[in-house]
Amino acid sequence: MPPDAVSSRRERSAHFDSDRKHGRQLPSVSCLAMSIRVRKFIGTVLLFALVIVWALIAMALAQTPVIHNNVAASIAYYVIVGIGWVLPAMPIVAWMSRRDRNSADRNPTNFRV
């Protein structure tokens, strides 16, 4: 490691130590947390990708002779696969709809965002 990198690390450490000694607050994790808008955007992209990948895999598996040649097996397969994408989507939707920690500050009327 170059000597200037070590000295800059020491300087930063000394700077944070002086902040603690003088009572200054360091950035907390809550100010670095994602807002609900960012979570919803990321979740929407993830759900869109999940549905596309799920549909492609379901169509590929539907072409197997066991499912393709048997009417009862194909009906059961399409019902199960048609509902099955909901299970991996549920944690994504739950994460997307989680409220912000400081949502009362941003939304004084207490309406859901």
Image: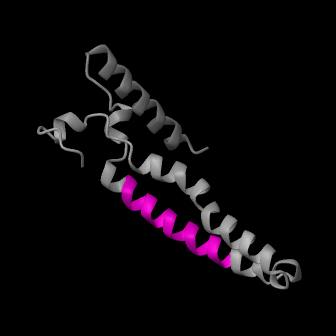
Residue at image position (50%, 70%) is 48
Principal SS element in the magenta part? Answer: helix
Q: Is residue 42 left or right of residue 104?
A: right
Q: Is residue 81 left or right of residue 90?
A: right
The residue lying toward the viewer, choosing from 8 and 87, is: 87
Furthest residue in direction right, as rendered: 66
Question: What range of the chain is rendered magenta?
Answer: 39-56
Note whether 71 is above or below 102 in the view shown.
Answer: below
Asked if residue 45 is among those painted magenta in the image, a careful observer would answer yes
Whether residue 61 appears in this view of the structure is no
Note whether 3 is above or below 11 in the view shown.
Answer: below
Whether residue 70 appears in this view of the structure is yes
Could you say where residue 86 lies in the image, as x and y percent from the top left?
57, 58
Could you say where residue 29 lies in the image, as x and y percent from the top left?
38, 33
Furthest residue in direction left, as rendered: 109
Where, by quadrant of the figure, is residue 26 drawn?
top left
Residue at image position (74%, 69%) is 76
Asked if residue 47 is among those painted magenta in the image, a careful observer would answer yes
**Can you say which quadrant of the picture contains the N terminus?**
top right
Q: What is the total number of numbered labels drawn onto the structure image?
A: 0
Note whether 68 is above or below 78 in the view shown.
Answer: below
Instruction: Give the colour scheme shown.
Output: one colour
Residue at image position (85%, 85%) is 69
Could you say where residue 27 lies in the image, as x and y percent from the top left?
32, 32
